[in-house]
Amino acid sequence: RTAAVLLAGGTGTRLYPASREDRPKQFLALGDDDRSLLRRTADRAGFADDLFVVTRDAYADRVRDEVPEATVLVEPEGKDTGPALAYAASRVADDAPDATMLCLPSDHVVGDGFRETAETAVDVAERTGALVTLGVEPDRPATGYGYVEPGADRGDHFEVAQFREKPDESEAERLLARDCLWNAGMFTWTPEAFLDAARAGPLAPVVSALETGGVADAFARADPVSVDYAVLERAGDVRVVPAGFDWDDVGAWDALERLLDGENAVLGDAATVDASGNVLASDDKHVSVVGANDLVVAAFDDRVLVVPKDDAQRVRELVAELREQG
Ligand code: GDD
Ligand code: MG
């Protein structure tokens, strides 16, 4: 029995102004598909026996609209993915006994072949009692991802020699040289295996508060921490199943280039003259670029962003600045 658990509580700042705190990345329809990333994730997980979505209060109604078939677990406060998954594990253990969790971020673009890899991974988790992650073949020393170093070959998966979350660039280069894979952020484990591993780290007070029934108490006690740092980097038995599908986290605007064909990557409506390598994204606005290359122009609501494509990651700095200004 498989219980899919979708994580849908992140804020996704680098896709400003399409992604805003009140409308984060998972609710956007990016690329050549009308469905939101969250809806696509639910469809992709359709083979699971149970479907849960963990999210924060502010997004709960939106999630219920988009994924009416799911059980929505609402966090009292957003404390990152560690506490969110501890909460989900305790609920799955209660509501769907004997189910293995298949935990999926809701803000990724995923190609064909997902189901086969996911079913293999669930099988590995059931067979071994380990924490299992899906691994993606890297193509650059990205600093925004976790890395898994494969160890012993176990046929349909590898043992994990090392799990390293968000290394700096020189460390990422070293990890690539050791044939590491990217952590796709998609995990499978039994609730018991996860809760045992979580008890050994910074989530210990959260797990023990959940056991005595207090979700509000558990989140009040929780320090914000991602599952990668809180559990995967420390766990004794982690396994990786290499992903047999295309994958992109769509972290920042430059990622659209990888999803959309053409001289310019256009999401929405645009016209160009003597312009190439641009990412042009808009809602109901028509965007034009003349004689300029390698820019991001993003126009959503009453906001326009222009940034050189190579600086697309720096939108994070802008959003921080805007927040400060209130
Ligand atoms: N419910 C809930 N609550 N969900 C959350 C929260 C929270 O407080 N914070 C983030 N999420 C959701 C996001 O919406 C997303 O779907 C997922 O959890 C992952 O969070 P991100 O914040 O996007 O993580 P990341 O991209 O920096 O890093 C993770 O994913 C990478 C691959 O995309 C890590 O697992 C990395 O190791 C991994 O490489
Ligand atoms: Mg992400």
Image: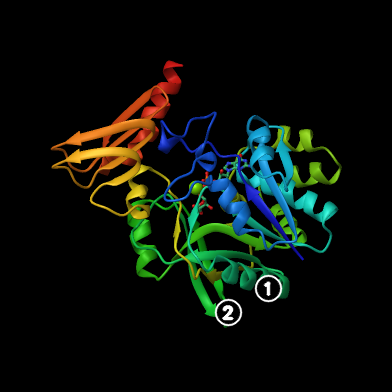
Q: Which mark is residue 219?
A: none
Residue wearing tag 1: 123
Identified at 28% across, 40% down, the residue is 311
Residue in the image at 58% along x and 81% along y = 154
Image height of 298 relative to 154, above or below: above
Camera-side residue of 168 and 81? 81
Quadrant of image for the N terminus: bottom right
- The yes-or-no answer for disc 1 within 8 Å of ligand 1 is no
Check disc 2: other Cα within 10 Å, few if <14, some if 14-19, many if 20+. few
Q: Picture coordinates of residue 13 (x, y %)?
A: 45, 35
**Residue 92, position in %: x, y?**
78, 53
Q: Residue at x 66, y 73 (%)?
A: 124
Q: Is residue 233 left or right of residue 122?
A: left
Amino acid residing under circle 1: Asp
Q: Residue at x 58, y 46 (%)?
A: 38
Image color mode: rainbow
Badge number at residue 156: 2
Is 295 left, or right, of 175 in this rendering? left
Question: Helix or strand or loop: what does disc 1 sit on?
Answer: helix
The x and y percentages for residue 62 are 64, 35
